[in-house]
Amino acid sequence: MELLSDVLRQATNTEPSRSEGQEEQVYTWRSLGNKIHEILYNYLMERGEQMVMDDYTRRLMEYLARWYCGDTEGVTDKIRIHKGWLIRGSVGVGKSKLLTSFCRAVNADFYDEIKRRQAPAIRLVHSFDVQTAYIEQNTSTIEALKSVDILVIDDVGVENSEVLYYGNRLCPFVDLYDKRYRSDLRTVLITNLLPKSDDDKEVTLKSKYGDRIYDRIRECCNDFVFEGESKRK
């Protein structure tokens, strides 16, 4: 199997390459990165979409693989292993599909190795699902989200800031993120919102969740801006 570093140099060839009879057995950031690439490619093919391997996709794919495996040797950009991620950008650039492929690569293809090494478990959830769990007071789901080693929350900001449960006002994202912060657990946030803005009318992470949570997001997240035009046709 070709190394991720080699794959990423092939700007015009997005199809994963393989060598017959060869399969990498060592669990490294390269093997994980190759698996993310393969899963993302197949995921898009099944949906009838073409894979566009732009610079942002390449870099984030490598950063996530390195971050999960704890190997940042030779990386010029600062990646803090103990922090989560704030992955932000406009709609349609490929944030959610890439993170979905990342989670699938970790949980499905490397599950036995993760159990053997006692590597951190990872879970992907949509912000609406977080909201629903609080509305229904699904305590088992809420506790699982609060305690999983790495939690990826997609579309942060589209859910309601507050929900009602028998007249009580609950703030799902604030409650969940605050508990994970206090437990020193890593959280990955995918959002279309800007962190903050001088325009008081624009909804931002700061205006939606308040100064305290916004400050904790800044403290606990590697920041990655996924730029580019929408890949949706």
Image (cartoon, rainbow, N blue to C red):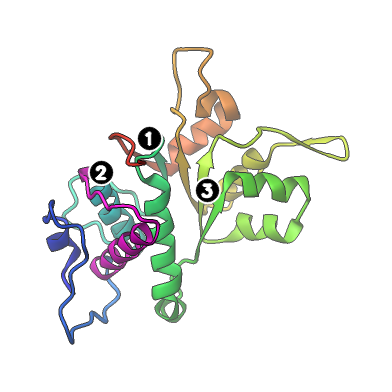
Q: Earlier in the sequence, mark 1 or mark 3?
A: 1
Determine whether, in the image, residue 216 is placed left or right of residue 27. right
Mark 2 sits on what residue? Answer: 56
Q: Amino acid at mark 3?
A: Ile
What residue is at 55 percent from the left and 34 percent from the top? 157
Residues at marks 1 and 3 touching, judged by CB atoms closer than 8 Å: no
Residues at marks 2 and 1 touching, judged by CB atoms closer than 8 Å: yes
Magenta part of the protein: which range?
30-55
Magenta-drawn stretch contains 130: no
Residue 89's tag is: 1
What residue is at 66 percent from the left and 32 percent from the top? 161
User: Is any atom of residue 82 visible in this view?
Assistant: no
When the figure is inspected, residue 29 is found, relative to residue 232, above or below; the finding is below
In the rendered image, the residue lying farthest to the bottom is 21
Could you say whether the residue bearing mark 2 is in a helix, strand or loop? helix
Viewer-proximal residue, 110 or 186? Answer: 110
Mark 3 sits on what residue? Answer: 153
User: Is any atom of residue 90 visible in this view?
Assistant: yes
Q: Residues within 10 Å of mark 1 (few under 14, many from 20)?
A: many
Q: Earlier in the sequence, mark 2 or mark 1?
A: 2
Q: Amino acid at mark 2?
A: Tyr
State the predominant SS element of the stretch in magenta: helix
Q: Quadrant of residue 144?
A: bottom right
Q: Earlier in the sequence, mark 2 or mark 3?
A: 2
Q: Quadrant of residue 219?
A: top left
